[in-house]
Image (spheres, grey):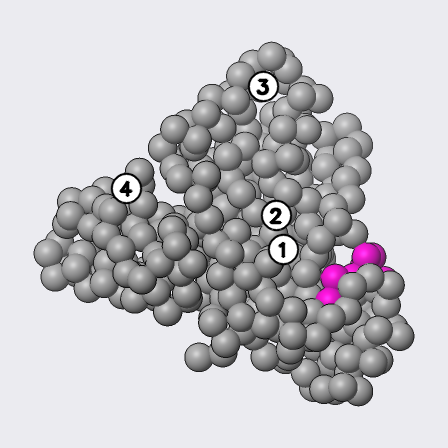
Amino acid sequence: MQSVFSKLKNAINGTVKEKEPLAYHTTMKIGGPADIFIEPRTIEDLSKAMDVIVSHKMKWTVIGRGSNLLVADDGIEGVVIKFGKGFAHLELEQELLRVGAGYPLVALATKVSKQGYAGLEFASGIPGSVGGAVFMNAGAHQSDIATILEKAYILFPNGEMHWLTNEEMKFSYRTSILQKERPGIVVEAIFRLVQGEKEAIIDRMLRNKAYRKETQPWDSPCAGSIFRNPLPHHAGQLIEAVGLKGHSLGGAQISPMHGNFIVNSNQATAEDVLGLIQHAKDTVLAEKGIALQTEVEIIGRK
């Protein structure tokens, strides 16, 4: 481990740390340490880091802004790679938007809307970064990433990087090919937007953002939606119907505002959150006959 740490420090520009608490890097403010934590500044740095990681057969995990993520209390084995400011580059040429995986999704939606480009208004209230949004086909307000993605630059487990087209990504509801069928991590994305009337676009964006603020607990540490909606039902409504809104376990609480959110109300642990997740799944299945599936990504030592 020490050899890998030293080689990574020598190989890349950017942050390289040992035993970095991942609670500092998740929106839920939960998560134990990474054996090694790095934040490369460029794609070239990432490539050099992957050469070291793959040659030493190290396990590795990529995070962005840490939303939609629950990290185990014992942390993550191997190397955790964070796509931060170095991966927040942006290039807009006519209606094609090329953007790094680390760019915050809300900031991106705001920026392009104010320039009169439509297509990302749905994302104006979705936390997290571009990479995670593409990985899980994030969506809201009857739209999603699949409707605008042209192609994505993907980092694969062997350290190689290749472009995948929209069709090759095999998008469906909150899923892509990267999650199971062909594991990979988004490094960059190219979106196709549409020029339109700026005032109307901004108005749609602001209305979407206001709706999120009014109905979801973004003023508390949380990871976004915990469960996928078992359409035509909605997870939050099912959880409310079985009387679990406001239910607590340890420092974690099912939000009194929205049943599909769990908030870190008082120094919650990952085990607290996992306990609430299981309780909600068991209760909804017993009382409604519907099996909930998690949308939040649960990672780390078991």
Residue bearing mark 3: 202
**Distance Cα–Cα, label 4 vs label 1:** 28 Å
Where residue 136 appears, x then y in whole percent?
51, 54
Residue name at image x 73 percent, y 81 percent: 54
From this viewpoint, is residue 294 visible?
no
Q: CA distance from mark 4 to mark 3?
A: 30 Å
**Of the residues under marks 4 and 3, which one precedes in the sequence?**
3
Number of other residues with Cα within 10 Å of mark 2, as a class: few under 14, some 14 to 19, many 20 or more: many
> What's drawn in magenta, residue-wise?
38-44
Residue 129 — which label?
A: 2
Specify whether residue 298 is in view: yes
Q: Residue at x 53, y 16 (%)?
A: 203
Label 4 sits on residue: 256
Residue drawn at (55%, 61%), measured in percent from left and top? 23
Disc 2 marks which amino acid? Ser
Quadrant location, the C terminus: bottom left
Residues under numbered marks 3 and 2 in contact, where contact means CB atoms less than 8 Å apart: no
Gap between marks 3 and 2 measured at Cα: 20 Å
Label 1: which secondary element: loop
Tell me: 27 left or right of 191.
left
Q: What's the residue type where badge 1 is placed?
A: Gly
Q: Secondary structure at mark 4?
A: loop
How far from the left and from the top, in percent, is residue 281? 24, 61
* Residue type (three-letter) at the residue carrying disc 4: Pro
N-terminal of the two: label 3 or label 2?
Answer: 2
Instruction: Give left or right: position of 236 versus 41.
Output: left
